[in-house]
Amino acid sequence: MNSLPLAGWLAQAGLRNMPLEDMVDGFGRRLNEAGLEVERLFVGMNTLHPMMRARSLVWDRGHQVTRHFEIAHEEIDSLLIRQSPFAAMLRDGLTEQRYRFDTGADVPNLPVFEELRAVGTTEWMGWVLPLGELSPRIGDATDVEHAESGFLVVSAATRRPGGYRTEDAEALRQAVPGFAVAAKAATARALSHGLLAAYLGNDPASRVLAGTVLRGEVQSVEAVLLFADLQGFTALADTMPGRDLILLLDDYFGCMVQPVVRHGGEVLKFMGDGLLAAFGVVLDGRASVCAAALEAAIEALARVERINKGRHADGQLAAGLDVSLHIGKVLYGNVGSDTRLDFTVIGPAVNEASRIEALCQPLGRQLLVSRAFAEAATLSRDRLVSLGRHRLRGVREETELFGLA
C-alpha cells in the first residue's frame, strides 16, 4: 500500500475540518481501495463536555457510518464500557492489540467479539492513541474510568480468510496514527464549541469561535427576555446538605433550561437560583418568537410543579418558580475587563425584565409579561389578560402588566 496519497488526503481532511463521519468514511473507502479489505471501523474519543464523557461511531463497508454512541459521565462505569476491548488495553497499557477469530485462540469472551464472529469476521486490530500528554502512561490508569481524557481509539476488522496479511497489518499501523492526527485536528473545533456552548450558550460559543472576542464588541438586537427565579430556595439551602442541594438545583434548572432551548431560546446567564434567557427576533418574526417564549415559560412552570408535587407528597420543602417575559432592544456581546469578559445582554430592557419578575409574588402570579410583550405577541393575545398598571422599581412611570388568562 502506497501511504503517500492517503497521508496527503488525511492532512487535507484535517486542515479543512472535515466532519468526522466523512473522514471515517473516506478513510475506510481508501483502505479498501488499497486492498486491505477492512469490513468495519470503530472510532471513539473522549470529550471535554460536562454531560458527555465520550463519543464514538461505527463504519461498515458499503454502508458508511451506521451507528453513533454517546456515553455520559455516569455511564463510564457501565458493563458495556467495561466489556469493551479497549478497557483492557487501557488497563494493561497496550497501544495495539490483535485477535484472530477464525482460530479462536486467546480471544476474550466479549459481546463485540461475539457480534463480529456472527458476521464472519476473521481478525480484529485495535489501537489506543494518546492525543495529549504522554504522562502519565496509559498503563498507569488502573481503570478506564480513571484513564487520561485525551485518547482516540480505533479498531479495524476484516473478513479476509486468514485475517490480515503481514503487509496489511503494517499498512494499518502506518495509516492509523495519521488518521488520529487528522481526526484530532478536525474535531478540535467541535470539541471547543461543545465546551464553550455548555458554559456560554450555543450562539455565544459560535460568535467567540468566529472571532467576536474584542472587549466592548457588542451589537444592538431585539430580543424577548425571559427572567426566571426560584422562590423559597433559601429555605431549602438552610435545611439540605450541600451535595443534595446542588443536585436539586440542577433538577430545577433542568426544568427551566430544557423548555427554553427546545423553543429556540438561549440561556445567557445563571444567577444564583435564577437565570436570564433570550429569544432573538429575526426580521418580522416578533409574534412567533413571543409565542415560543411564552410556551417555554409555561412548560418550565409545569415541570417545576411536577417536581414540587413529588416533594410535597414526601413531606419535603419545595421552591416555587416565578417568570417574567419582556421584549426590547438590548446590547449583545462582550462586556468586562481586559482580563475577564462575559458574553451577555445589557440595557434597560434587561433591568425591566428583572423588576417585572420581582412583582410576581406581590401580584400572586407565577408568570408576568410586559405591555410591550403583550402587544408584540399577536399570536398569543387571547392567552393574556391585563393586570392593571404597576410601578417597577427604578422606573418613573407605571407600566401595564399581563398574566395568563
Image: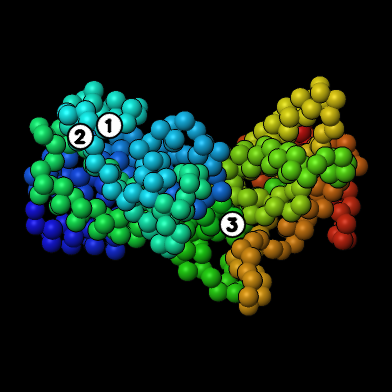
Say whether residue 256 is left or right of residue 189. right
Q: Residue at x 87, y 61 (%)?
A: 394
**Residue 351: quadrant of the picture:** bottom right
Label 3 vs label 2, nearer the camera: 2
Label pair 1/2, CB-CB below 8 angstroms: yes
C-alpha distance separating marks 1 and 3: 46 Å
Relative height, residue 310 to residue 284 (above, below)? above
Across and down, in percent, residue 309 comes to 78, 25
Q: Residue at x 58, y 43 (%)?
A: 261
Pick whichever of labels 1 and 2 is earlier in the sequence. Answer: 2
Q: How crowded is mark 2: few (under 14 residues within 10 Å), some or many (20 or more)?
A: many
Which residue is disc 1 drawn over?
A: 107
Q: Residue at x 59, y 55 (%)?
A: 199
Kindly report the distance in space between the C-alpha atoms of the residues bearing marks 3 and 2.
48 Å
Residue type at mark 2 is: Arg
Q: Residue 200 carries which label?
A: 3
Quickly name the residue at label 2. 100
Examine the rendering and report whether any part of residue 47 can be seen.
no
Which residue corresponds to the image point at 10% horizontal and 32% vertical from the top-left? Answer: 161
Residue 303 vs 233, above or below: the answer is above
Q: Is mark 2 on a helix, strand or loop?
A: strand
Which is nearer the eye, 128 or 380? 128
> Image quadrant of residue 331?
bottom right
Could you tell me the amino acid type at mark 1?
Val
Q: Where is residue 20 in the image (x, y as percent from the top left)?
A: 32, 49
**Type of amino acid at the residue the image marks with label 3:** Leu
Q: What element carries label 3?
A: helix
Left or right, 403 with reference to 336? right
Q: Which of marks 1 and 3 is nearer the N terminus?
A: 1
What percent of the width, then of the height, locates residue 334?
60, 68
